[in-house]
Amino acid sequence: MTNPRHVRLVSVDNLGVDLCNICRYSGPYLEALRYGRCRCDTSFHSSLSPVKHTKKTSKAPPANTQIVSSSSSSSSSSIRQMKVIVFGSTGPVGRTLVEILSKEQPTWEIFAVTRSATNKFDNLKNVVILQGDAINKEETMKLSADKDIVYSCIGFARYEVKYWAKHWPIVVDNLLLASSQKEGQKLVFCDNLYAYGPTTKITPSSPIISASNRSKPGIRVHLRNKLQQRMNDKPESIAVVVGGADFFGPYVTNASFLGDTLTKAIVEGKPAPICLGSSSVIHDFCYVPDFARALYTVSINDKANGKFWICPHSVHNKTIEQIASDIAQLAESKNGTVTVYGGWSVRLLGLFMGFMREMVEMLPFWTKAYSVDDSDFCKTFGTQATSYEDALRGYIEFNR
């Protein structure tokens, strides 16, 4: 994305800064990556392509910076052409990530893996569809062999303990092997926050629960331990994990508590939007575009390597009751009253419905206050989540 003739300033904290040769505005390098243009006027120079940058000779750079060309070594992987692969590319986060990668890095070769070879990216010229499944070791190794970054946005459609216990360890083992095949190869892993258990003020350094094959949170701890072991034993084989609480946003239908049974029901005026557990305790949510952008951000910043992160969250300290009411107001719907299926109802329905049976162990996540602290990510990478109202509006539009 950066022309070798452009001049970049790289600060001591490894966040790059570009200088616009029109307004001399210096802004965060990640903003330049995000917008591909300068912010010195309302039209962004009327260009979707990167503005050219030249060295400003009238004023020396700040003392804490050094001038390097884009051909020099840098903490940002974005300055060179790369081959990257996305497993789980048809899910909400994976699909959004592929779109972000294609837009932000038009010179990258992006390979989107899908089990059915369904092409959801025919309008993206630098995206190639590959048929494959991360459960297959040989296939995963072959597809990833020459890739610089291996992104995993995999999520199982089957929300079942036994299925997770059997398949998740295999998938993670395969991804760890597949992303260790050449020097500098990086694994970027999309995770949930189950490993911390049902609690409040979760940070990346919060205690995790015990590993177990008998619960979905316990299984996620097994996976986290595998990833942590890779970080400890093979730091040269780079791994980065970004976690998020329950998400909502584009392409999310029935895979979210804010999905079809709540937001879509409200928008379409259907009776009885529902929630499980409780509607009166706070529960934080992240917006899919923010989650996907966080994965992209850590993939191009070496300071992210070998760590667990929590992505920016748009919904903080809100109850389902409040969220439903706000969705109804923004959607101009009168259908904002939520029907709650409490613990006894979920257990009773679990006798007849597999999904409800699987939800019984997850009830503490929905009957107790559940909040996350995303400040570490936001401060480190100079970013923030989409605003609460904008995120809700975006999801409402998706559901119209």
Image: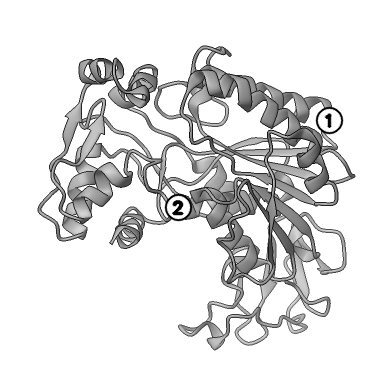
Look at label 1 and name its amino acid: Lys
Secondary element at image label 2: loop
Closer-to-camera residue (112/352): 352
Vertical relation: 218 (above or below) 79: above
Q: Residue at x 41, y 41 (%)?
A: 255
Residue 8 horizontal/vertical position (percent): 76, 70
Task: Give the camera-side residue of 121 and 306.
Answer: 121
**What element does badge 1 sit on?**
loop
Q: Residue furthest left?
A: 334
Task: Give the camera-side residue of 385 and 88.
Answer: 88
Label 2 – label 1 distance at C-alpha:
32 Å
Q: Quadrant of residue 71?
A: bottom right
Q: Please name the residue shown 58% across and 64% down the image.
A: 121
Residue 122 locus on image (x, y percent): 59, 68
Provide the residue designation for mark 1: 234
Is any part of residue 384 visible from this angle? no
Tell me if residue 145 comes above or below residue 53 in the rendering.
above
**160 sits left or right of 388 in the view:** right
Around disc 1, counting alpha carbons within 10 Å, would you say few (fewer than 14), some (14 to 19), or many (20 or more)? Answer: few
Of the residues under marks 2 and 1, which one precedes in the sequence? 1
Residue 310, percent across and down?
A: 53, 39
Instruction: Determine whether 287 is above or below 79 in the image.
Output: above
Which residue is more in the foreground, 294 or 125? 125
Of badges 2 and 1, nearer the viewer stands 1
Q: Is residue 348 left or right of residue 255?
A: left
**Residue depicted at x 69% and y 26%:** 170
Q: Which residue is mark 2?
A: 385
Classify mark 2: residues with Cα within 10 Å, few (<14), some (14-19) or many (20+): many
- Left or right of 290 on screen, residue 331: left
